[in-house]
Image (spheres, rainbow, N blue to C red):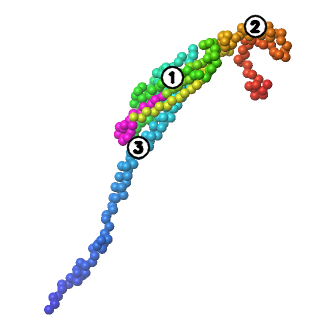
Amino acid sequence: MNAQRAPGSVAESIRSRRPTGDPPGTRQPRQAGQSSVEFAIIALLLAPLLLTIPLLGKYLDLAQTTELAARYVVFERTVAGSAAPVKSDATLAAEVRRRFFSRSDALIKTGDIAGDFTGDRNPLWVDHSGAPLLVDFTADVAVRTVAKDNTAPVAERLVPPGDFGLPIRNEYEGEVTVRPRDVASLSLFDRIGLRIARHQVLLVDSWAASSSADLRSRIDNAGRAAYPIEPLELIGGTVGTVLPPMVLDPAMDVGNTPPEVIPCDRLEGGC
């Protein structure tokens, strides 16, 4: 005799045979949070790059400023005379530290120096942590200038020394060196030992007079080898007065030095 099933047993049997998930071998692994993990890993890898790009831009700005400072130094080195004594390297270094490597809105004052505190530093030249790249202005910014002899004025070597006053020592060199500090918390930049140096050379003709009288005095007193004014005056006062006007027209006027008069061939309309 077959056993009778209890009511509801067929439904329970059918329910027990119903699949409860994906077919075997087709279940996919859970991916919740995978994109967040990947983003975090990529961000960690890109963090040094994001810190490096602004730092490289600041180094380039420092290099450009150093170039401008070198031009200023070599020009200031050429300005010398009775009214403007030669500036020493220490004086020029103090000027460029204050006028180029301090704040861009710093006032230009005689004898002013840049202080090693936040108020005098350029707010752009800091690392990612806010620490200044130029810690000590005196140690981090240096200036060197040199005046050299130049062989360009050959006429000076053809006459006795000092006769005509042509400059020989008129080639000037200026160099500005900047040493920004290493960034301790950034790999590769923590031991880079960066040194930024810019060099400029300027060749000038400093044979200039302070006035018309000074210019005439230099020419008249240049010496017989450079400007034999006495023999020329003798010729002009004798032969120059009796020769026909067709030969010397007008008559020779030795010692006449009109520096204020512009020659007609230099005027816009010409002679």
Amino acid beneath label 2 = Leu
Amino acid beneath label 1 = Val
Dot 3: what SS?
helix
Q: Nearer the viewer, mark 3 or mark 2?
A: 2
Quarter location, residue 223: top right
Q: Nearer the viewer, residue 146 or 243?
A: 243
Q: How crowded is mark 1: few (under 14 residues within 10 Å), some or many (20 or more)?
A: few
Dot 1: what SS?
strand
Write down the residue under mark 1. Answer: 146
Amino acid beneath label 3 = Leu
Q: Nearer the viewer, residue 119 or 77?
A: 77
* Magenta segment, prevailing SS (helix, strand or loop): loop
The spot of residue 107 in percent (x, y) is: 50, 26
- The residue shown at (69%, 13%) is 227
Given contact means CB atoms under 8 Å apart, are the residues at marks 1 and 3 in contact? no
User: Alpha-carbon distance for marks 3 and 2?
Assistant: 81 Å
Write down the residue under mark 2. Answer: 234
- The residue shown at (41%, 45%) is 50
Query: Which residues are the magenta region?
Result: 176-192
- On-image quarter of the C terminus: top right
Q: Nearer the viewer, mark 1 or mark 3?
A: 1
The spot of residue 129 in percent (x, y) is: 38, 39
Dot 2: what SS?
helix
Identify the mark nearer the N-term, 1 or 3: 3
User: Can see residue 208?
Assistant: no
Identify the mark nearer the N-term, 3 or 2: 3
Q: Is residue 142 above or below residue 221?
A: below
The spot of residue 9 in percent (x, y) is: 21, 82
Is residue 11 left or right of 110 when viewed as pictured?
left
Q: Residues within 10 Å of mark 2 (few under 14, many from 20)?
A: few
Write down the residue under mark 3. Answer: 51
